[in-house]
Image (cartoon, grey):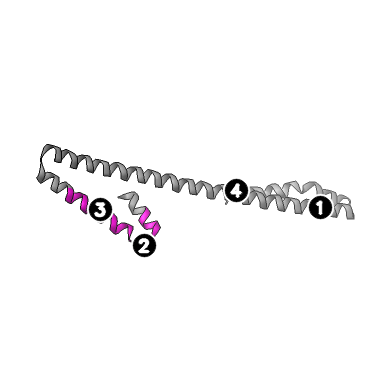
Amino acid sequence: MKSWKWIAAGAGLTSVIPVAWMVWKPTWAAGAVLTAWAVAAAVCGAWLVRKSEERRQQAIIQNVEQTAIQMLNHHRHDWMNELQILYGYIQLGKHDKSVRSVERIKERMATESRISKLGIPSLVFYLSILH
């Protein structure tokens, strides 16, 4: 948002020479040059603002993508931990603990299911990051 101010200031400063020429010697040629200069500065300024906005949007998209990847990695790691604990209990023959582990996994799955069905994508994404 701030970059457009700098672009406008730069476009205004570049028109000092044609404006000075118009003030010093007001002719049709000076007016034509000033007009062409102003149009060129406006077009360049608009192009630079558009490019700046595109870069900003691309940065936001990359940030969201990185956050999503980190969130998925975190969830995958948590699920792998749960499965390793369950597998260990099964290998050790501790069926009572394996049943409790399965219950804990079921509760977690139910919680994640309820979060995913909220219907508000930004809220689901936020709660998924916290969970």
Q: For mark 3, what is the residue?
A: 109
**Residue 92 sits in which quadrant?**
top left
Mark 3 vs mark 2: in front: 3
For marks 3 and 4, give the CA distance. Answer: 43 Å
The amino acid marked with disc number 3 is Met
The magenta segment is: 102-125
Whether residue 116 is visible: yes
Q: Amino acid at mark 1?
A: Leu
Q: Residue at x 40, y 47 (%)?
A: 68
The residue that mark 1 highlights is: 34
For numbered disc 2, what is the local secondary structure? loop
Q: Are marks 2 and 1 in contact (CB under 8 Å)?
A: no
Q: Where is residue 16 drawn, in percent x and y?
A: 77, 48
Report the Cα–Cα distance between label 1 and label 3.
Answer: 68 Å
Q: Residue furthest bottom?
A: 119
- Please, what is the three-letter code of the amino acid marked with disc 4? Ser
